[in-house]
Each structure stands twice: as C-alpha cells, then as structure tokens.
Image (spheres, grey):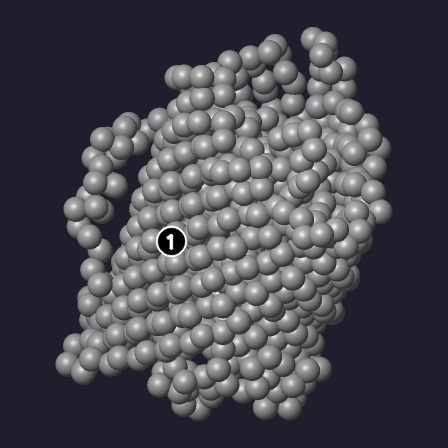
Amino acid sequence: MNTPSTLRSALSGTAFGASLAAGFALTAGPASAQTVTAPAQPGAPVALPQISVQGQQPENTLEGTLGLGRMPGRIQDQPQTIQVVPREIMDQQNVTTLGEALRNVPGITSSIGEGGGGISGDQLRIRGFNSQNDLYVDGLRDFGSFRRDSFTFEEVQALLGPSGVNFGSGAAGGIVNITSRTPHLGNSLGATVTGGMDWMLRATADANYQFSETGAFRLNMMYQQQRITDRSLPTGERWGIAPSVAFGLGTNTTLTLEYMYYRYDEPTDAGVPIVSRGPGFIGQPVTEYGVPRSTWYGSNFTDRDQTTVNRLTARVQHVAADWLTVYNDTRLGFTDRSFSFSVASCDATCISRLFNGGGTPQYALSGGGSPYTQQVWGVQNITTGVFRFNTWALRHEATLGVDLWYENYDRTTYSYTTDSGRGNYRGNLFAPNNDLNFAYALSTGATAQRQNETTQAAIFAQDRVWFTPEISVLAGLRWTRQQSDYTSYGGTNPVSTLNADNSFIDPRVSVIWEPTPEYTVYASYAQSTFAPGSNWATQPGQASVNNSNLDPEQNTIYEIGARASILDQRLGLSASIYQIEKNNATETDPATGVVFGSGDQQRIRGLDIGVTGRITPEWLINARYSYMDSETTSSLTQANVGGRVPYVPTNSASLWTSYDIAPGTPYNVTVGGGFTWQTDVYTNSANTSEVPYAFSLDAFIQHRINDQLLVRVNGYNLTDNRNYTQVWTNRAVMGPGRAVTASVGVNF
C-alpha cells in the first residue's frame, strides 16, 4: 500500500516550511488540561463522568489524571506504577527532548540501535525491555522512529509494567505517553530564548487565543541550533510548528484538532567501541582507557539524521449522559528520514596497542553503519465508552473500546562503493579524522528494499467493581488480531515475502483498597504480548520464515503497591514491588543468523519509590528510586543462566527540588537542582561488557523580574562526570560535559 501523495502534500504544505525557514521558533503556553468531576444531581445513583476543562495540573501528580478515556480517574487510583514528569519541572530543567525528560524516570535506559538494520532516535528500554513501539502521544501511537523535541509537551507519563489491555501489542516493560499542549479558555502568550555553551541557541513560544465562549486556538513553535558540549560533533538544527484548535471547551462535547510539523538536521553518533583487556576482564568503552571524551568517529559530510514529521490528530470527548462518556481519537502521521552514521570498531591489534603500546591503536569503520532512507506512515482510531452504573449494591466503572491501526514502513538501504576506501580505512583511535567523505550508492543486497505493513484490530473491555466503598476489583481483557506482511528485494535478488498472522488475549486483574481518598493499596496481575512481525522492517534479523511461525512473546507482571497523598494533599508518596517474567524470548543463532523461539526466560524483580509535590507551599520536590534485580532464568546458552539482563541497572535514582525565596516580592528567587544516577549496566547476556555508572548533578537559579519577565541560569553535569547516554552491545555514546545555559522568558 503506497502513501497517498495528495494527502502527504497537503500535510507538509509549503507555507509552514517557508515560515520555519525564516528561523523563528516557539514553544508552549502556561495552562494544561485537567479533568474535574461534574457536580452530582440530587438522587443520582452513580458517579458522573468527567468533563474536560482547563486548569493547572496539581503539583502532587498523584492527584492528576492521565487524560485517557480508557484509564479514567486519578493516578492515585490506578493499580500500576506511574511516574509523571510535570510541566513545571521540565521548565525548570529547561528540557528540550524526550530523552532529557525521561532522565527523571529511573529504570528507563536508551539504546543506540543499528544503522542499516535497526532503529535509532528515541530507542527506549523500559525496565530492561525493548520499547521501540511503545511511545504514545495523547494515548495514540506516534508513528516512526525519531528524536522528539519537547516544544509540544505538557507532561510526560511513564506507565511501568506490561500494559497490554490498555495499549496493545508490545508494552513489555511499560509505555511512555506524552500529553500535548492544547487550547484552553483565556488568552496567553509566552516565549523563551535560551543561549548556552558551544553556540547553543533555542527559541520557543506559545500563543493561546480564545475566539468564542467555548473555542480557542493555540500555536506552539520552536527553533534550536546546538553543538554538544565537550564533544567534537558539528552543529545540529531543528524547528517545528504545532497549531491546534478546540471547540466546545467546558461543555459536554469537545473537539480538538492538532497538527504538528517538525524537522531536524543533526549529526549522528554511533558511539565509541567497548573493548576488553583480555580473558577475565570486563569490557568497557575506550573512553575509560584514556580516549578523550570529545572523540567522535563520524563524518562531518555524511553522518546526519535528517527527519521530517507531519502529524494530524483529532480528538472528540462527548458526555452523552450522566452514566456515559464517549471518546473518539484519530491520528494520521508521516515520518520521512535520511540517516547515516559511522560505526567504529577496535580489533585485536587495536586493543593490543591501546593497552600494551607498540604503535598507534587504529580503529576501523565497519558493520552497522549503512546509510538508509525510510518513509513511515500510519493511521489509528480508538473509540472508547466509559460507563458508570449500579447493579444492585455494586457500583461499576466500565470501559469498552475498539482500537484499529495500520502502519506502512518502507526502507531503502545504501552501501559504500568499493572505490571509496571505507572498507579498508584505519584511523587513529585517539584522534579520528572527521573530514572523511565516503561515496555510497543503492545497495544490491537481498534486503536493500524493505517494506512492512502491519494491521491491528483489537477490542478491549474492563470493569472496576466496588464491593464496598473502600474495596474494588478491576478486571479486563484485550483481544488482538495482528497481521504483518513483509517484502524485501535488492539488485538481482528475487522478491522475498513473509507473513505473520496472530491472535492473542492479554488479561489484567487488580484488587484495590482505598480506606480514604488519600490512601490506596493494590495488588495487580497483567500481561502483554509481542507478536512476530512487529519489528521486521526495523530489525531485519527478525524477518525470517522461522520467525513468522513463532508464538508471540509474553510478558507478565505481578505488582503490589501503595500510594498516599499527605500534607493537605500537596505531597504524594508511592511505593511498589513487582516481578516481571518474559517467556518464549527469541534468540539468534550466531552461526546462521536465524531467529528462533528459544523458550528463554528472563525475570526482573524490583522496587519503585517516589515522592512528588510540595513539602511546603514554597518547596517543590520530585524524587524517585528504582531497584531492579534482573536475571536470565533459562537459556540454551547455559553460561548465561543466572546473569543479569542487558541494559538493566540494579540501582537508579533521580531527584529534583526547588525552593521559592520571598515569593510575591521584588526580591523573589527560586533556587534548586538535583541529580540523576544509575549503577553500571551490562551490554550483553554473557555479562562480559559493561558501561560504568552515570551521575549528573544539575542546578538552576531564576528570578521573576515582574509578572511578565523571568530570567534563569541552568548548570548541567556540574561534576563533569563521564556519562553515557546510549548503549549497545559493543559500543556506547558519550554524553555532554559540564554545561551552562541562560534563559529569558516572557509571559502575557
């Protein structure tokens, strides 16, 4: 199925492109969506549906909502670990990307992906499990793999643990959902300009205009250029515009239409090699052995990530009656991408010279760095009904919905020409030549052209039943039918086709005890399923006849948790313990490259603790700690049994806090800061290579000169620690060094 060219042209309209090329960019406004309960009618036997109005989300995020029809109620009431990064904290940290926002969520790591075969962009691992298909915006799939900018973010929500009932196939370790900035009643205008080290410049702005009693228009815009501090990469640039309009705000029927155009052109970084001194030694990145932090093995000419995203969303919420609310959400998205990076490797001779001398250690450029272009488009519609009713003495809150989506993924791979010299290139490991410009052409490999079409249809239903005002049970099921059709060819190679057609059921059962509205205790069981064919286009090693016949992977969680809102509900406390089991994990035969169902099992036992909100009206805090005991419990490779699961830190934590001094006076100052920390992670199942611990100490100070003008200074990685922001089996990407930015913001 080909992308409709007329629709693509309409979405990517030249007027937006012209305005963006002018170099002005902007970000969001001050208000955020919140749901409140309508007042009860005299004698009404059931709780009434929630009506979407505008207001500030509570700083105790447990008192907020997810904004999703299929998960009604407060976060306090949800029987699942949920961590929220609110707008205020993202503003104080001057967050610019999804990756930066998720530094506040322990237990989420980022991997690099592969050039010719795998993906990059926001490639997350949640509680150690690949979550490449588990990124959502306003509860809908965000089609395509790319690096997301925060200029439209109102809030970032991490729902941890298998979430198959509410989100479908995948969701092994959890999902990340971004809530967007949308129109609100009232007029507002905000803009921020930030400058920083290494020619960093970012401008964001947000305008909201109320054009009728129930209608409003909002416009978010952004422009940024930046080099990474203490790294030798060239400058990157990105810009975006996101208009939205809403009708019926504050009424029983609300329609919101959003469009986003987003483009960036940034250098790519495949990381530095991970090497080992020899038998008995654990491999580590070469930057742990004297190679400078600034080292980049890429090309100034060719190693770029050039991506364009067009996304259109329509959301309808209708309160049909006191007992029924209906939601209908639709998304159409296009992502076009051109990508290339250079993967450096250090062979035995290079390693020997690195540790023993005898000459300059020389790296080679090999494997995984093939350039490619890809076009992804997809459409999704979710219709949900929320029913509130009584049966005799039992109160119910039931959801019933249909989830339909289609995604088309085309990829063209290129290879370096034989006369380019890349295949035999050797460079100084300590001082790479970044001015290389290797020629490449369309690949003639068997999978040079790849297309994958995925169609999914699902029905989900769940019901929360109150047996007493304090005790309830939430039970649900999701039935899914997923079909993937894969085609590949290249040069004189024949066309190869694969098909996978699977149906499966994901259950969920929770017991919830709420002795008062401020306290919640729950015990939960849930399952999610990952079907063959879900990642054939992005990971071609998974595309095989054998894999098409595999049973889906299954992930199961058992979780016990508790939440409390204290200090007049200003402060939220949460804690949970859990066990996730992954069954029927796939494995690749190292000799043949064939993917097969190994029956391997992985288990993660963990603890999550969180604090969110205000200790006093002046003192804001958001702190979390995660402990994960990961283990491969069964494997055909016997030596791997008992080892830690790759990319899973045993301990990780984040803290962000701020204090308002003399608020409401001309002498007001807000000071604050915090840290992110995680212990080392292994990068393979054999546990023979690792990336060291990461620690970043950050701080800020800001002063509101008057009601309209604010100035802020941020410092990052103040201890100048060597931190790795992305990891892969044999390499790791070095993060920035110590950095400082200054911002000026205006609000009207």
Residue 358 in the image, given as x and y percentages of width and height: 52, 75
Q: For the point 59% across and 84% down, which residue is it?
A: 600
Q: Residues within 10 Å of mark 1 (few under 14, many from 20)?
A: many
Of residues 435 and 576, which is closer to you in this image?
A: 576
Q: Can residue 330 be seen?
A: yes
Residue located 45% across and 32% down the image: 254
Amino acid type, callout 1: Gln
Residue 721's spot in the image, x, y percent? 66, 50
Locate residue 676, reporting x and y percent: 68, 48
- The image quadrant that residue 289 belongs to is bottom right
Q: Which residue is mark 1?
A: 380
Seen in the picture, residue 371 relative to 92 is either above or below; the reply is below
Q: Residue at x 55, y 12 (%)?
A: 708
Total number of numbered discs in the rendering: 1
Query: Residue 704 at x, y = what percent?
Result: 63, 16
**Mark 1: secondary structure:** strand
Above or below for 475 versus 634: above
Find residue 328 and report its image quarter.
top left
* Quadrant that contains the N terminus: bottom left
Kindly identify the residue that appears in the image at 47 percent across and 62 percent down: 459
Answer left or right for 711 relative to 633. left
Residue 673 at least partly seen: no
